[in-house]
Image (cartoon, coloured by chain):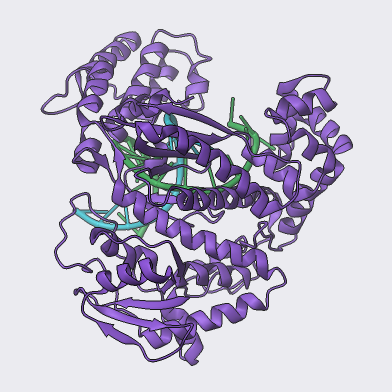
Chain colours: A purple, B cyan, C green
Amino acid sequence: MLVAVTADPGGAGGLLADLTDGGPPRRVPDLAAVVAEREAAEHPRWVWASTADVYPALLRAGVRVARCHDLELTEALLSGHDGRWGEPRGVPAAIARLRGLSVPADLPRPEPSPPGFAQEALFDTVSRPAADIADLIAVHAEQQRRIRDLAEAGRFRMLVAAESAGALIAVEMGHAGLPWRADLHDEILRELLGPPQPVGPPRRLAELTAAINEAFGVHGLHPDSPAEVVRAFARAGVQIPSTRRWILQQVDHPAVAPLLDYKELYRIWTAHGWAWCDAWVRDGRFRPEFVPGGVVSGRWATRGGGALQVPKVIRRAVVADPGWTFVVADAGQLEPRVLAAVSGDGRLARAAAAGDLYAALATDSFAGDRAKAKLALLGAMYGQTGGDALPALAVLRRHYPTAFDYVEAAARTGENGGLVRSWLGRTCPPASREAFDGLDPPDEVAPPPGRSRGRFTRNFVIQATAAEWALVMIATLRTALEGTAAELVLFVHDEIVVHCPAGQADAVVAAVHDSAARAGRLLFGDTTVRFPLDVSVVGAYADAK
DNA sequence: AGTTTCATATGG
DNA sequence: CTCGCCATATGAAACT
């Protein structure tokens, strides 16, 4: 059962059209109520222009849906597959193409949700004009036709389903929010930085600035200005190319120690300090906006709040509600396992059956040297060309030629200007993307792709497939958790955090393991490669693993 | 003054 | 050529 939906901008009503039975669209005054009713009765797949636009209002009305088809995300996947990356994207562009009209430029996305969240009208976040429902139906039919014509239609359908499920999850995670104790955050900051000052940096930073100045025998030096620090070292007779941490660590000078402390703490103060907390934490929840497919590899991005980069020390503020707990699961060694699965290298796949792939690889081929085995595999996936990894890479090439050739072929395709795809069919952007993205007329041929392009395509086939595995995994998990109180509250590439009543933790742990196994089978079928998870049940995110 | 790039940190 | 991939975020510095 497929039902197309549009929401009235600024109102609570909308239009529904049955795609399976046909029939004319029906206008309803209370869209959320009708969606809830049909969801309970027949569990349809909802077809809409953009989950990010439509679903938040449904959630606020207390309505969850199980499945959808996100036309906008699907359109992006399809036009990427066609190699039409530079053209205007989005549903309006698809409609215009269908009608044979000139294609409008992308309509602006709604502003990143400012941290205050006042909501009045039910669908007031729908800031773009709602598309005509007949157009949506036409775009959907056209997408189905395009997918049917693909050589790997089955896989691509799985990708579309997973991407759409991811869109639902992203909105649900934003709705739930990550439990965040502002009081503990403040405690952590005071421990590290000292009390906040009405104006200027906190006490500890001021002390370190004084110590650095004293070590140089100067006054008024700003430690956060790399240029000033480089000059100060030069006056002290030390030539440094930059103030990167690893450079400073090699310098013997009394200013180095306070400088390194300063840099670390300054970072926390500016990026995750009191101002951040005021801006992003409300009512005990951190609510970033998650953007599925926000990265070309299919990994998610966030808009605002830096939710994917929360420093480890700050995670002590992420504490489960009383009587609740976190289940934190992390897919270990995901990318090398993906390489084993997609390449079909039997020998690597046997190593990937082990809980510690690198250790198994070391036993098999690297005389037990785990570090060397790991270096070789990472070097192959990232396109390392020099350094101490070279001998290890030679061993890898000799013992696992199928896996080695897989990434080599992807690199060569990129270097020759070609496109590569993930396992399910997500396509990398063309090399000339930047050139055609802006207004620059493409008056000359694209620059020769070069080696960095090769490294990009080499890594893309792995990273994008790893992102697919993770997406299928969380989609499967979401289904398993349906009807329980457990909620996904964070998803960071290969790691998830579920917030659940303490009594349900065991069931959630089982569901998480099961979802990982299912994801492996759904993507790769019968393979010896396993995708084990490190799972912890903790009261605070910082205590995981 | 406003915008873009650089440098440096964080995360995977 | 701190490696070799993908990001976001901040302030300083450079640029228009």
**Residue A299 versus residue A479: which sits nearer the camera?**
A479
Query: Which residue is found at the position 19% from the left and 53% from the top?
Result: A117
Query: Which residue occupies 51% across, 43% down?
Result: A493
What is the x, y in percent for residue A481?
A: 43, 47
Q: Position of residue A153 (x, y in %)?
A: 67, 70
Instruction: Give the residue at the far front of this rendering.
Output: A41
Residue A116 percent coordinates (x, y): 18, 51
Residue at 43% across / 68% down in the picture?
A43
- A33 left or right, relative to A327: left
Total of numbered circles in the picture?
A: 0
Q: Farthest residue toward the left?
A: A198
- Residue nearest the observer in this picture, A386 or A519: A519
Query: Relative to A178, is A436 on the left or the right?
Result: right
Image quarter for residue A18? bottom left
Give how far across and how far down residue A364 sits, in percent. 83, 27
Q: Specify whether residue A67 is in view.
A: yes
A394 lies above or below A514 = above
Q: Observer-nearest residue: A91 or A197?
A: A91
* Residue positioned 45% across, 86% down in the render: A96
Is residue A310 in sight in this rendering? Answer: no
Q: Quadrant of residue A55?
A: bottom left
Vertical order, A500 against A183 (above or below): below
Q: Does A200 sit above or below residue A507?
A: above
Q: Would residue A159 be found to the left or right of residue A320 on screen?
A: right
Depicted A24 relative to depicted A426: above or below? below
